[in-house]
Amino acid sequence: MTTTRTRRAATGSLTGLALGDALGFPTEFNDVPSILAKCGPWREMELPRPAFVTDDTQMTLALGRGVRTAMDGGLLTPERLVDPVRAEFVAWYHSPDNNRAPGRTCLEACELLDGDRVWQEASRTGSKGCGANMRVAPIGLVPGLSDEQRAGAAQLQSALTHGHPTALAASDLTAHAVYLLAHGAEPLGLIGQLRSYAYENRDRYLTRWLGDLWRHTHDASPEAFISRGWDECLAALETVRDALRDPSPETDPCERTGDGWIAEEALATALHCFLLFPGDPVTALRRAACTRGDSDSIACLTGALAGAHLGDEVWPDAWAERIEYRSDLLSLGALWDA
């Protein structure tokens, strides 16, 4: 059961996302012994100076701005959402600040989106990299959406770049997790709620939002297409449940729930880190950043979950005040917290 919305959940989630991203930026592509040699004990990791973020936060802000523009025109619909988000993604692609080791899928898709082809032809339907669910938190934070709008927008924003069904399902689940936590869901029951949601949606292809995307694959039907993604996400959620039955905070979470380069593993390992320390968000971020895998994306998702759950006051002022893009993060957070 969810209750009232967490105080300033949007600001807390976006701030946590960026802090995790910045904390994990210097440790990405390193194994744990190398991280410990560079940063010292993981429980004492400090935010880098300056606190630069990666494409994870840049694309989260791009999506957030696109959603804001879409909703300035009225209720959120696929027709209203596609063009402003597409324009934001293309602007990010051309930005001189797009120099933070962005993923190949995002670059390829955004190059193809920069033109007049239908977006389904730009979508990389073979890619389930984590680039789509690392940026989806805004969809879980925007107030006033129906379940159908939230699911449709989460999957559509994924499909603009990452059209693999597992990327769609993982983005939907990530947005749903952020939404649940922002509305008072207890961390203890979160995995069960996400599993139920996945089962309920397993055969549901959102034609209004995705159009004929499934026809750009080798699947026999839209249901066969989307169920592939939900099944992989259900298997990933099971790894989290198994890991938490026998928690081991000092062990690299990637050993149990995956390295996070692909969508379902990024969600699973972020959930793993968050649920190891549900009341200690800074420790959760540090654990996520000290991993052998896609540490910036794992930590940014961990921060999005923790901030949605606990609000903005849980982050140290000395960290939050110097995070890159702070004014942009606060602007969107204030809009959605209002």
Image (cartoon, rainbow, N blue to C red):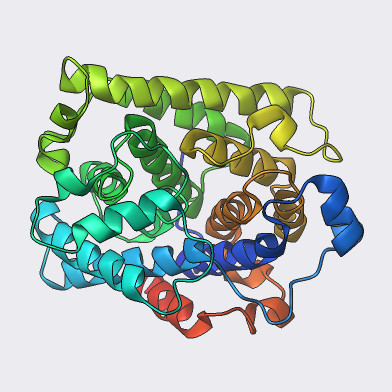
User: Dividing the image into 4 quarters, which one contains the C terminus?
Assistant: bottom left
Q: Is residue 17 left or right of residue 118?
A: right
- Along the line of sight, the residue nearer the viewer: 184 or 58: 58
- Along the line of sight, the residue nearer the viewer: 109 or 228: 109
Q: Position of residue 337 (x, y in %)?
A: 41, 70
- The correct choice, above or below, for 3 with respect to 13 in the image is above
Total labels drawn: 0
> Picture quarter containing residue 90?
bottom left
Q: Is residue 151 left or right of residue 31?
A: left
Q: Position of residue 25 (x, y in %)?
A: 65, 63
Q: Is residue 63 left or right of residue 272?
A: left
Quick check: can you spot residue 154?
yes
Residue at 74 percent of width and 74 percent of height: 48
Residue at 69 percent of width and 82 percent of height: 50
- The correct choice, above or below, for 196 with respect to 59 in the image is above
> Picture quarter containing residue 238?
top right
Quick check: can you spot residue 139?
no
Residue at 47 percent of width and 76 percent of height: 329
Q: Is residue 19 left or right of residue 200?
A: right
> Picture quarter containing residue 63?
bottom left
Q: Position of residue 126 (x, y in %)?
A: 33, 33
Residue at 71 percent of width and 26 percent of height: 243
Q: Position of residue 43 (x, y in %)?
A: 86, 56
